[in-house]
Amino acid sequence: QGCCEGVRRDAEALAEMMVRLCPEVPWLILRLEVIQNNACWRWHQDWYTGRAIVTYVGPGTWAVDDAAVRFDRLNAGATDGLVPDTESVYRMTPNSVLLIKGNTWPGISGLGLTHKSPDLRTNNGGRPPPKRLVLKADLADDRVFD
């Protein structure tokens, strides 16, 4: 019960924080997911208004500052060479909260945080990639559901 209660408290705290940050956004979506493959394997920016994400088990989300992104390649839909300097990648540690401002965050108009799932490949022994336990609190407007 301790783990479940902790996750419930975290979900409540993340939800309250997100609603306080953008009270005009009509939708709040909470998800607790077990992820084993690269759910968001390519660098991208969300069309959600915002997301708070915490990884409890496994490697956390990767994110980069705008200066590290080749926006010409991102905007062209390329899947490689978007972040040429791997030293610039922030790799979230377990139990850290990452606040992702999406492309519809008030006042930023299309400059959301560029991020992706960590690279999870089979290891040298051929075993499957590790599972991740991830809590997400997403703010969304009606465009996300179109």
Image (cartoon, grey):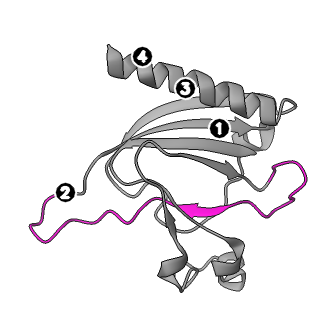
Mark 4 / mark 1, whichever is N-terminal:
4
**Toward which corner of the image does residue 46 lie, by quadrant?**
bottom right
Residue annotated with mark 2: 128
> Marks 3/1: CA distance?
11 Å
Label 4: which residue?
Answer: 5
Q: Earlier in the sequence, mark 2 or mark 1?
A: 2
Q: Residues within 10 Å of mark 2 (few under 14, many from 20)?
A: few
Which kind of residue does numbered mark 1 sit on?
Asp
Q: Amino acid at mark 2?
A: Pro
Q: Is residue 24 magenta?
A: no
- Mark 3 vs mark 4: which is more N-terminal? 4
What residue would you read off at disc 1? 138
Residue 85 percent across, percent down from the top left: 53, 85
Q: Nearer the viewer, mark 4 or mark 1?
A: 4
Q: Amino acid at mark 4?
A: Glu
Q: How far apart are the alpha carbons under marks 4 and 1?
A: 20 Å
The quadrant in which the C terminus is found is top right
Observer-nearest of 78 and 95: 95
| Residue 76 in view (yes/no) | no
Q: Which residue is mark 3?
A: 11
Kindly report the distance in space between the C-alpha atoms of the residues bearing marks 2 and 1. Answer: 29 Å
Q: Residue at x 44, y 42 (%)?
A: 95
Q: Where's residue 81, x and y in %?
A: 54, 85
Residue in the foreground of this view, choosing between 23 and 31: 23
Which tag, 2 or 3, sits closer to the chain's start?
3
Which SS type dominates the magenta stretch? loop
Q: Real-space Cα distance between discs 4 and 2?
A: 29 Å
The magenta span reads 104-127
Distance CA(mark 2)–CA(mark 3) = 29 Å
Callout 3 secondary element: helix
* Residue at 65 percent of width and 27 percent of height: 15
